[in-house]
Amino acid sequence: MTAKKETSLPAGRIRDLLYRRPEIVFSVLLLILIIGGWEAIIALFNIPPILVPAPSAIARSLWANLTTPRFYSHVGVTLWEILAGFAIGSVVGLFIGVCIGQWKMLEKTVYPYIVAFQTVPKVAIAPLIVIWFGYGIMSKVVITALIAFFPVVVNCIAGMNAASYQQVDMLRSFTATRWQVFRMVKIQAAMPFIFAGLDIAIVLAVIGAIVGEFIGAQAGLGFLLLQRNFSMDTAGTFAILIVLSAIGMILHLLMNMIRRRIVFWNERDEILAQGSS
Amino acid sequence: MTAKKETSLPAGRIRDLLYRRPEIVFSVLLLILIIGGWEAIIALFNIPPILVPAPSAIARSLWANLTTPRFYSHVGVTLWEILAGFAIGSVVGLFIGVCIGQWKMLEKTVYPYIVAFQTVPKVAIAPLIVIWFGYGIMSKVVITALIAFFPVVVNCIAGMNAASYQQVDMLRSFTATRWQVFRMVKIQAAMPFIFAGLDIAIVLAVIGAIVGEFIGAQAGLGFLLLQRNFSMDTAGTFAILIVLSAIGMILHLLMNMIRRRIVFWNERDEILAQGSS
Amino acid sequence: QDLQKVKIGVGGSNFLNLTYYYVLLPGPLGYWKEEGYDVEVFPVSGSAEAAQQLAINNLDFAEMNASAIIQANTEQKLPIQAIITNGTIGWGLSVARDGPIKTVADLKGKSIGVVSLSSGGIPLLNSFLKTNGLDPENDVTLISTGVGAQAISAFNSGQVDALMYWGTATVGFRNAGLELETLSDPAWKGFPDFTFSTVKSVVEKDPAMVESIARGMAKAMVFAAANPDCARKLQWKHYPDTRPTGMDEDQAAANDLSLISVILSEQAAAAELNGNGQVAGASVPAFGTYQDFLFDAGVLTSKVEPAQLVAGDDAFRERINNFDKAAIEAQAKACDFPG
Amino acid sequence: MIEIRGLNKVYDTRDGEPIIALKDINFDIEQGEFVTVVGPSGCGKTTMLKILAGIMRKTSGEILVRGTPIDGPNRQIGVVFQEPLLLPWRNIIQNVMVPIEIQGRSKAEYGPVAAELLRLVGLTGFDKKYPNELSGGMQQRVGIARALVHDPAFLLMDEPFGALDAMTREQMNLELLRIWHERQKTVLLVTHSIAEAVFLADRIVVMSPRPGRIAEVIEVDLPRPRTLAMINSDAFGTYVARVRKHFGAEGLDG
Amino acid sequence: MIEIRGLNKVYDTRDGEPIIALKDINFDIEQGEFVTVVGPSGCGKTTMLKILAGIMRKTSGEILVRGTPIDGPNRQIGVVFQEPLLLPWRNIIQNVMVPIEIQGRSKAEYGPVAAELLRLVGLTGFDKKYPNELSGGMQQRVGIARALVHDPAFLLMDEPFGALDAMTREQMNLELLRIWHERQKTVLLVTHSIAEAVFLADRIVVMSPRPGRIAEVIEVDLPRPRTLAMINSDAFGTYVARVRKHFGAEGLDG
Ligand SMILES: Nc1ncnc2c1ncn2[C@@H]1O[C@H](COP(=O)(O)OP(=O)(O)OP(=O)(O)O)[C@@H](O)[C@H]1O
Ligand SMILES: Nc1ncnc2c1ncn2[C@@H]1O[C@H](COP(=O)(O)OP(=O)(O)OP(=O)(O)O)[C@@H](O)[C@H]1O
Ligand SMILES: [Mg+2]
Ligand SMILES: [Mg+2]
């Protein structure tokens, strides 16, 4: 049957794809729509190219970037900052979130201060970070981690609070310690929350790395953004933004794949799931 | 009994408070600890006052601010930006989140693009926002909303996916429409997630308002921050940061109060709750 | 042999391009290495941050605004001292070339775009308006238009009638196609602007190092003045990511050349202040008058002895400028760098 | 009225080994009939009920209601689930009114019906309480009231009285028979009590364990209306013994 | 062994009107005794069990185990809850092993015990399945296996066999009696089946509805070991009738 499909006309293949993985087809359609809408808005609102360049100009600039080997070292720097910052931020965030989730008292005392600390714009504490972590990549990683950790904390706490108290009581009846209750129920119940937190953290990590580089950097996509901005090369700016977006999108999709492997217990029968909701 | 308590010595009163609302006592202790730690770090790491001022200097600057009527108009401007941006961001975020949560197809097609869009640093699209919303408060509100809406979207989607499929099936057996399933189960199940998202959104709204003002503003706490920074008034900078943090903290506590009224069904028996977890 | 590590921060610009050739090129040209130093240059987001990093010896030197140097001394009692002034105030109030506004007085009732309402240009603008009979509070509206494209679109769309920006920013506007006429107060030419500086204790502890670093910069300044295009080529070669993008090669070269020509003319104006024909130096009287101006404008709450604001003595500056100018110029003219 | 033709259900499981829950079920339910289903735990009773309720896909086979294949839930069906499945954020009366709300029926009209049903299941005074403030049996009774509130023609009940004490259970049985008779409903009821199965049924469907198949369909020819006194009759005992034979049970369950 | 003295429990509810669940319960359980509890739905049986399990605060009163007041859960207690309460992210064998993990016992040693218990409850082959892949009755049986796996001296069972079919239920009853006898356990079992209560018990505690009080404690003087044949004996019938009297039920439940 597949053999037959493979020999069919392109239209047939797309119909086939539409049937098997409709989201791919719609995703591509959406991309076309976005680019089209972009062109339309530029035309409609009469936006000068210095503000928003035409997609074709961006594509050219993007292509120029992608064919320059040096560009990848900038991508590498920023990607490293994002990943390291995200990793540190999530681990620290999980740790803090778990502690607060375990001791109700901390939720009422420490948590509000964490919220308060989080409202401080990172630029304001950048000088301190530079003292402690230098001018290199490390200070950007720290800034990224500082930005990324918060959603993980908030969602981890909310998730642990959402654990069913009946399940907790069941464990307690077998003399479970607070730590065992955490390990066997609370963290599991928190998983859907934690993954949502990580999803937000990824996006904040991307922004964090760029903010960190804006504070002062010698390399990275944020550095390139400043350069493009200084040259008033809007197409170039947008090309970098697209690379950033692609990084964010890929990390999000990866995270989603991991989530689906770990949080499986509220999935029903595949066939039915499509029928409903 | 309370009458008797009221006439007791202050030490007794604190003990009484410790018994009834221990979190208040600990919260105050923690504040003292933070300030003490601050002083200690400054002494220990020999941090010069130009980098981090002493708490006393900050307190003086804070007091000077709080006794200047004009200061409150700046607070008012930023607070308005925060609240309006937060409100718009959460409503839009809820709307988008609900739509994506309702139609699985959107989750696979539209959602990744929202993630991608969100990774774009707001400074990069500031010029566009300024064109459409002018140089006044409105553009800051829009930037705040753009930053604040994302955690609400993510958590709303995750929350709706976490709805128990047994409950959904129960409703479906009575011929519930997609919309009724949403209204009667999904949104309720999503509430703990949504409040976590709102909690993150509040913090991002505070940061968003400041970022918006950094891009260019005539008034507001972000404007004051720039001004203090330019005059190398570090104590002044920190005083403003403290006001910002206080705003964030109060909004967080308010949100928490609302949450506890709405998400009540996983709370058990007060007395027991203290005994365990 | 082991080179001594030196860190220079460039305040107020988070992106280092040809504008800062005088700290970027001595390295590749080998001027610092031959005196035994290995110099790293960092961008630092603002002058205030640069002062902070200097204060805690996290940086050895910083490029920062003269006003920030003075403020650090008067407001923070932080003895930061000027070594080489790289330019005089190049700020200008730009209006449409063939527009209705011809003089400052024509700005009554108009809007002026500034980078931010807390920028260093505000005191300058205010005094400029006052000298021309306008009340800065009531006669004009200030709008913070940020940097780059945002400012240009504000001007193009008529949201602002004038732009009060520093020299290279104004060049950027012109490069982007704005037809501008720039008005400025002649007094500004006497005010130092971007300045290479350090804390007093560094000068006292290791004067030889300070001299060597400053000398390397002085050589680069002579080099660039002799052959700006060679400086541009060197910059592009050694800092390829700082070259303008989004345009063809010729356009990029032209833009960078006009940029460096502004820098060089500001540099020449700064050399004027030195008074004795020295290429590199800082002028005590110039810092003194600028301090007076800032004090009158209400930016400062106190003043210090002007000599406090400048590092070393005449002999110190003499040693900085003590090198074979002709040889450097010849090297620049030849512009013979492989690769 | 309802025809089940060659119904099969295979579940996919996480460990890859599928579970055959229903195998070739063929079976008709007449209008107004009271059918009870008995069978060992895990034999597919709940699965069959969910498929009839239109909330679970069948693997193959056909289900026809008055000749047309069903493709989803129906307003004329009321389901009592094996677990109470109450919504914890709604109080009891709001939980009972769920079908009314869903089907857009008049709240004013059905409010008294709900109150009457709560009285019937012995929960008067609990209408403003929340589900987790109720005992297990009380929650189950709320589920029963919810299934009846919109007066559906066809009732699907999955062990509705499993968590109830002897007396309440008997009362509920009688009430159910009364409602079924007065309102001319069609009922399919799953139970583990063989006596209950005999007492209520026109026909008893006995299922055999994995893969779930119909072992026997027993016509119960006891007079209507049924009374508790009949339990001690010989005819009753014969039916009970006939069902019990399938289980090999001795009679602890009644 | 266990003395319950003046036990009271009042629940606060959201609508402000408190529920008195238990009122002045006084009652002793001897070591090695098999006590069953019957009582109408909502009379406080589950509440009492949870208090004995040490996972719910009492409002007043005292519970002494071998003379010392209990203040929390105990390693020597095994609880079967009214709902299965399985952890959906663990497969069946992992769910059964929960008490072993909690109490830090050797997995190697208790692994075979768990497998044997799964066999006993008829779930061999389902050890790698996940809870939501099991039927209601199968889940309940996993809960029973979980309560037994660490071989506790004291079993608290809340309607453990409510969702099981006749035959499985009888088998489980016999198995429970065997384990109780061989292992010298003390058991407190809540049931809605009067026959089951009589069949299993040394003593039957009959509770009366809200506020939950003890109506009667009935000593069951049937010989041990009990056999299914006894069900049809007169003595058995007398006990059943005596309990049934409290409910006013006619005997549909067995
Ligand atoms: N969601 C599911 N995924 C996989 N297998 C399932 C699922 N639901 C039920 N099963 C399997 O299908 C079979 C029948 O289950 P079902 O719930 O219909 O039994 P039942 O007759 O209602 O049993 P009980 O009397 O215990 O409730 C069982 O073997 C069970 O393991
Ligand atoms: N968490 C709670 N909050 C408030 N009231 C409760 C709570 N749990 C139980 N109750 C009330 O306490 C009473 C006794 O409940 P309990 O669960 O102990 O009954 P039960 O005897 O186990 O009933 P069943 O046989 O139906 O399981 C009931 O009236 C119930 O409404
Ligand atoms: Mg079932
Ligand atoms: Mg109970």
Image: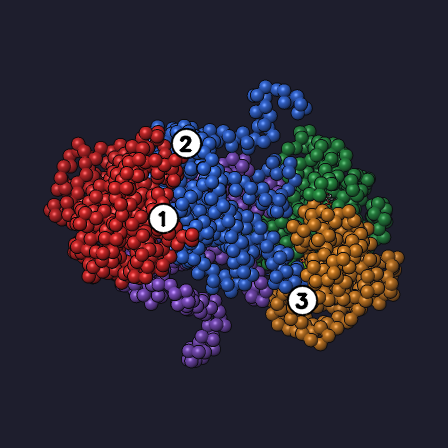
Chain colours: A blue, B purple, C red, D green, E orange
* In the image: residue C18, left or right of residue C131: right
- Residues indicated by labels 3 and 1 sit on the same polypeptide chain: no
Residue B137 in the image: state x and y as whole percent. 31, 46
Query: What's under tag 2, amino acid-wise?
Result: Ser
* Figure quadrant of the N terminus of chain A: top right
Which label is found at residue C34? 1
- The residue carrying pointer 3 sits among few (fewer than 14), some (14 to 19) or many (20 or more) residues within 10 Å by Cα, namely many
Instruction: State the CA–CA distance, disc 2 to disc 3.
Output: 68 Å
- The residue carrying pointer 2 sits among few (fewer than 14), some (14 to 19) or many (20 or more) residues within 10 Å by Cα, namely many
Which label is found at residue E73? 3
Res A63 → quadrant: top left
Q: Secondary structure at mark 1?
A: helix
Callout in the foreground (2, 3): 2
Viewer-proximal residue among A18 and C154: C154
Q: Is residue D110 visible?
A: no
Q: Are marks 1 and 2 in contact (CB under 8 Å)?
A: no
Residue to which mark 2 is pinned: A61
Instruction: State the CA–CA distance, disc 1 to disc 2.
Output: 40 Å
Query: What's under tag 3, amino acid-wise?
Result: Pro
Query: What's under tag 1, amino acid-wise?
Result: Glu
Residue at left 35%, top 29%?
Answer: C248
- Residues indicated by labels 2 and 3 sit on the same polypeptide chain: no
* In the image: residue E238, left or right of residue B248: right
Res B245 → quadrant: bottom left
* Figure quadrant of the C terminus of chain A: top right
Q: Secondary structure at mark 3?
A: loop
